[in-house]
Amino acid sequence: MSIKAQDTCVFLFTIPQNAHFATADHLANTYLLHGFEVEKYDSTGRFVSRYSNNRLGVPAFLDASNPLKILVWYADFQTAVFLDRNMTELGRLNVAEVGFPAVRCLASAADGNIWAYDEASSYLLKLSTSGEKLIESQPLNLEFAQRFAPISIRDDGGQAVLLSDPVQGVAVFNPFAQLDKILMFKGLTQFEVENGVLFFAEKDSIRAENWRGGDSRITLLPSAAQSEGSVFWLSKKRVFVRSEAGVEVYGF
């Protein structure tokens, strides 16, 4: 494996909002979570629309891999809300009510369903948006020397499903939830995957790694994301850095 020359991130714009999470879709729209609000901005940073639901608490995570069916996860209430491109609610699913009360993390599946990791059973599950169990893995506590505790899931366009346990690495599953391999990238609290390439922060850089094997590419993080205690999020070709001015958006 060789590592290609470093690139640098390009500053695009700042959104004057104090967010606790940010992500983007493949159309370069930005989504911010702040308080009870879910906000959408276009590729230039112009506000488009918002969704708010204070009955479900503060949203913890948003998956915009399908911009026509956005998933918002309300962890405290174990509820996933689905929004259309206009941020209008399409439906919702309480995973505890359908028999999975200990979902630690979840994400959109490429086919419109949901991937979820159930901590109680240690299964990777594919669920329909109505809560029907479609696929389940083997118990993952049998595959690892210690308890498997992923904190993030991503579907790589239907080719594979990746789960990151910061202590044990990134587990790669085939589309039928069968464990394929373990990638020894540890310490990942967030990552993105697209067309076989895994993106994650490493020291002062973004590392792009083909999970099937091959070259790596290194992109320097914005200087604002390199300082100790900085807060930033990686998404599809975007880095979002929290600053005093709001959320700074960079392309890479």
Image (cartoon, helix red, strand yellow):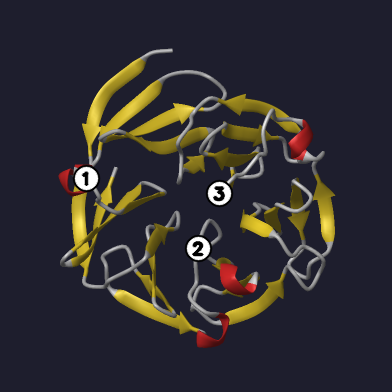
Asked if disc 3 and disc 2 are in contact, CB closer than 8 Å, the reply is: no
Height in image: 252 above or below 38?
Answer: above
Residue carrying label 2:
61
User: For the residues marked 3 and 1, what is the alpha-carbon distance in whole angstroms?
Assistant: 22 Å
**In which quadrant will I find the C terminus?**
top left
What x and y, as percent, mark residue 100?
77, 62
Question: Residue 170 falls in which quadrant of the image?
Answer: top right
Secondary structure beneath label 3: loop
Q: Residue at x 54, y 27 (%)?
A: 211
Q: Amino acid at mark 2?
A: Phe
Q: Amino acid at mark 3?
A: Ile
Q: Is residue 230 left or right of residue 67?
A: left
Q: Is residue 125 left or right of residue 32?
A: right
Q: Residue at x 21, y 42 (%)?
A: 226
Secondary structure beneath label 1: loop
Disc tally is: 3
Of the pair 30 and 241, the residue shown nearer to us: 241
Q: Is residue 78 left or right of residue 137?
A: left
* Crowd around label 1: few <14 · some 14–19 · many ≥20 (10 Å): few
What x and y, as percent, mark residue 182?
62, 27
What x and y, as percent, mark residue 199?
43, 37
Secondary structure beneath label 2: strand
Chain-order first, disc 2 or disc 1:
2
User: For the residues marked 3 and 2, what is the alpha-carbon distance in whole angstroms?
Assistant: 11 Å
Residue carrying label 1:
228
Residue carrying label 3:
151
User: For the residues marked 2 and 1, what is the alpha-carbon distance in whole angstroms?
Assistant: 23 Å
Q: Amino acid at mark 1?
A: Glu
Chain-order first, disc 3 or disc 1:
3
Asked if disc 2 and disc 1 are in contact, CB closer than 8 Å, the reply is: no
Seen as rendered, the residue at the extreme front is: 146
Height in image: 90 above or below 62?
Answer: below
